[in-house]
Image (spheres, helix red, strand yellow):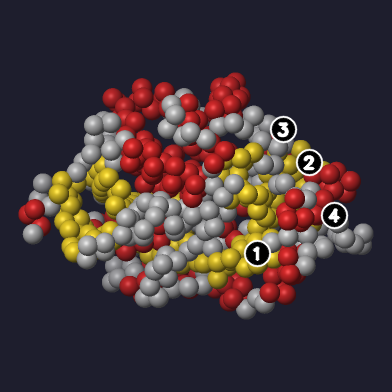
Amino acid sequence: MSKMAKKTDVLLIGAGIMSATLGALIKELSPDWNIQVYEKLDQPGMESSNEWNNAGTGHSALCELNYTPQKEDGTVEIAKAVNVNEQFQLSRQFWAYLAEKGRIQDPSEFIMPIAHMSLVQGEDNIDFLRKRFDKLSAHPLFPGMEYTEDPATLEEWAPLLTEGRPATEERLAATKVESGTDVNFGALTRILFDQLEGQGVGVHYNHEVKDLKQKADGSWEVKIMNHEENRLEFHSAPFVFIGAGGGSLHLLQKTGIPESKQIGGFPVSGLFMVCNNEEVIEKHAAKIYGKAKVGAPPMSVPHLDTRFIDGKKSLLFGPFAGFSPKFLKTGSNLDLIASVKPNNVLTMLAAGAKEMSLTKYLIEQLMLSDEDRLKELKEFIPNARLEDWDIVVAGQRVQVIKDTEKGGKGTLQFGTEVVNSQDGSVAALLGASPGASTAVHVMLDVLGRCFPEQMPAWEGKIKEMIPSYGKQLADHPELFEELFEQTGKALKLN
């Protein structure tokens, strides 16, 4: 049966934002290539990319304090914030290109302007925020950043922060950038897949990838269960991308490539409080990020988040971490156990021994009551009432565990990781934040790793779609200003 495998040029596993972005890039660069997408659920963007399963910030490091750590000598390091911002600009440019070409009809369906704020309390944290502001506000990629410790200004920026706050409390300080965005990655994923199908890309739902084997000619045979027709199918392609969210690790392990060894995954789930009171929702218009608690993973930084979902303004607070052994919301309770292999068991054990603070944090989070969560919300909204908020279970995140030179054996990675075979025939996307916001940068990285022979011919088209490609905008402030204005118009943000 495998000899009758259907052939395609590019096979994408998972109908999330990463496969959507890679498919959209390839279709622009090589329109004649045959692309087939296989998704085990019945719709695109239902797991990590879904709007209810991610924070939707449009991570551009304007407000996320974990991207600007304070060093032991008291100085604030902004290199990661600059890097994340640079990467988000690539996404913004590509989306603007798609909008200008009519590939995206109405950008407001997935991206909206919203202020990004950072909020801290207490003298030490205020000192940190002031230092962070001094560095970022002087950087060309962070224009227009404002800083205040004035209660009247805070009330103007975000009235929910100050209403009912006791005058005896420690002082607050905040920064604000008006040019931030809210990105609905679920909506964007659906838009991109609709467009890809219109361009002849085959998108197959209810199709679950069961196995991958490399053939003698270097191409991959992919065994797929067609749940719609209850039968096994075999497909082959010279290039396979595994963009299956939390499910990517298991599929990467099935490839058997050397690069898949000594890699593990640790699942972290989350909860959000979602406001059901329209009066409260209308009083707030910003994304406000605080500081992470000790031991908390970066994606658990508390934030009060204005979102635009299904054409409606929403207000979320969280996330609160949880634990489930599942690697996907729709996964199995055996996912974590099944990911432990002879080649990664020592890596996993080493991580467990090193990450006791994370374990302690997760246990504390699991024990939180609704009243405990309300208490944390009151740090942002002193007048918050429990009856105004519902609980929504967010998506699963699988943090990568691997051996590194710097971190040693079993180091937990808090980022997005691309793993590819040496011959470039297969690549997998692992990890979490900033993830979706930097999808274009990550997928350009995949193209560079896996299609080095085609890249010289593609470079001109890539620069047409993403004008800053190959440049650091931080070194070209005038270009940044020009592109920011241009993309803002194309995406209807100005």
- State the separation of the CA atoms marked 1 and 2: 28 Å
Q: Position of residue 387 (x, y in %)?
A: 73, 69
User: Is label 1 or label 2 in front?
Assistant: 1
Say which amino acid is labelled 3. Answer: Gly
* Residue picked out by circle 4: 162
Determine the secondary structure under disc 2: strand
Determine the secondary structure under disc 3: loop
Image quadrant occupied by the N terminus? bottom left
Label 4 vs 3, first from the N-terminus: 3
Q: Position of residue 265 (x, y in %)?
A: 41, 65
* Residue picked out by circle 2: 147
Q: Quadrant of residue 22?
A: top left
Image point (27%, 34%), residue name = 452
- State the separation of the CA atoms marked 4 and 3: 23 Å
Seen in the image, is 92 located left or right of residue 259?
A: right
Label 4 vs 1, first from the N-terminus: 4
Q: Is residue 460 visible?
A: yes
Say which amino acid is labelled 2. Answer: Tyr
* Residue picked out by circle 1: 273
Image point (44%, 73%), residue name = 325
**Which of 383/196 is in front?**
196
User: Is label 4 or label 1 in front?
Assistant: 1
Say which amino acid is labelled 4. Answer: Thr
